[in-house]
Image (cartoon, helix red, strand yellow):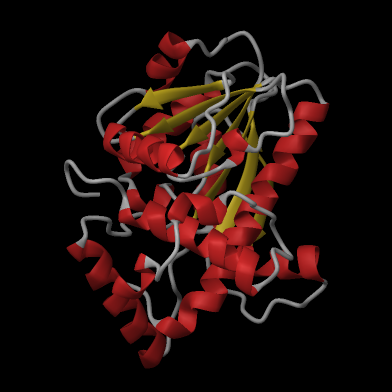
Amino acid sequence: MQTGQPSRTALSAAWYRAEHQELDGGRIFRDPLARAMVGDGAGPVAEYLPTDTHERMRGFLAARSRFAEDALAEAVAAGTGQVVILGAGLDTFAYRNPFPAVRVFEVDHPDTQAWKRERLARADIRIPASVTYVPVDFEHDRSDTALYAAGLDPARRVFVIWLGVTVYLTLAAIEQTLAQLARMAPGSRVVFDYGAPMSAPSPEVRALVEERMRRLAAIGESWISFFTPGEIERLLADHGLEVEEDVLAADLSLRYLGLEATSGAGPHLVRARVPG
């Protein structure tokens, strides 16, 4: 993101969630606050994504939110009472939280957080007492230090949602965050997504990707980190985390809609845990 500016890709993700409610009937993921957060009018995604990818992006973003919140519900049922959303952007979970006893910590860049709070006020969305904002720059700050200072209890299990972030970070920043997560209480869990490198793309696909990368670079939000599933498993193991599930995003079509995936490529979603 550009210094002094909120994340434009965070706005795009929220816009896609709102569009999923209206164009797809929220059939994968229900978010009744999404439209209020982004407002009316055209979304910003046309600036850097080809029009013919919009339906696929809506489905992916809805599926990753559903995957994360389903896993969160399981963790809460098992006794987890703390939720951390890393790179919260315009995510609305904290404002429609169905678990009154669960405390939510939203971690993001201070510019993006200030922008989000303005949007919440404009939409007349109440900020519950269970929400704590934790300003962090992932490339330069320690998120665990900031979280503990904000009141996160290191002795109790935590569920961490980390979506739409790793692809924008350096390997060093990703490793630092994983190491911090691994020091949380045993039984804590994290759900995150990651981009996989393309293998032998067609000239047409390569051209689309190169154009998307050019446009993202122009707004200071380039995709820079990609991993294979094997690399992710080794990376987590090296930092003390165990992979419970690594799912190709396209395969979630079968899980949520009963439809076979049309592609074996694309981003992945991971659920991992702190052993013990």
The reply to whether residue 227 is visible in this rendering is no
Q: Is residue 211 above or below residue 104?
A: below
Front residue of 267/31: it is 31
Relative side of 42 to 28, left or right: left
Q: Position of residue 200 (x, y in %)?
A: 43, 82
What residue sits 69% from the left and 63% below the top?
Answer: 26
Total labels drawn: 0
Front residue of 50/237: it is 50
What residue sits 35% from the left and 75% below the top?
Answer: 46
| Figure quadrant of the C terminus | top right
What residue sits 45% from the left and 39% below the top?
Answer: 120
Q: Position of residue 127 (x, y in %)?
A: 52, 28
Q: Is residue 47 above or below residue 163?
A: below
The reply to whether residue 83 is visible in this rendering is yes
Relative side of 130 to 86, left or right: right
Q: Quadrant of residue 170?
A: top left
What residue sits 66% from the left and 18% below the top?
Answer: 157
Relative side of 205 to 161, left or right: left
Q: Is residue 111 above or below residue 63?
A: above
Q: Quadrant of residue 212?
A: bottom left
Front residue of 88/125: it is 125
Q: Position of residue 195 (x, y in %)?
A: 46, 60
Q: Position of residue 50 (x, y in %)?
A: 38, 81
Q: Is residue 5 above or below residue 207?
A: above
